[in-house]
Image: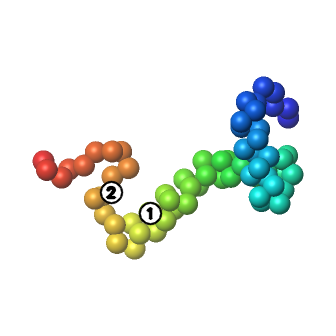
Amino acid sequence: MTVRSIPEGVHDYLRDRAKSNGRSLEAEVRAILVNAYVCSQTGGFGQRLRQRFVESGVLGDELSTNGSSDEGA
C-alpha cells in the first residue's frame, strides 16, 4: 500500500508519534489502521465498558447513545 500526498503536518505528527512509541513510521501507521479496524468491529473501549455496566444493571436507559433523552418530557 502506498499513500501519497499526505500533508506535511500529518507526516510530521506520524513520524513524531512513531518515535515516541519506539516504532518505525510504517509500523506506527499499521498500528493506527489495525486499531481503527478493531474499534469498528468491537465498538471501541468505551462502548464495551458501557455494555459491561448495562449488563451488570448499573446503567439503564438514562445514557442514550442516540442523543435523545426522555428527561423533562
Q: In which image quadrant can residue 20 be found?
A: bottom right
User: Mark 2–mark 1 contact, CB under 8 Å?
Assistant: yes
Q: Is residue 24 visible?
A: yes
The residue shown at (72%, 44%) is 13
Q: Position of residue 59 (x, y in %)?
A: 34, 66
Label 2: few (<14), some (14–19) or many (≥20) C-alpha neighbours in 10 Å: few
Q: Position of residue 72 (x, y in %)?
A: 13, 50
Q: Nearer the viewer, residue 29 or 6?
A: 6
Is 62 left or right of 45, judged from the image as shown? left
The residue shown at (32%, 57%) is 63
Q: Nearer the viewer, residue 28 or 44?
A: 28
The residue shown at (56%, 55%) is 44
Amino acid at pointer 1:
Arg
Query: What is the quadrant of the N terminus in the image?
Result: top right
Question: Which residue is label 1 attached to?
Answer: 50
Q: Is residue 34 visible?
A: no
Question: Which residue is label 2 attached to?
Answer: 63
Amino acid at pointer 2:
Leu
The residue shown at (68%, 52%) is 35
Per the model, the C-alpha gap separating discs 2 and 1 is 9 Å
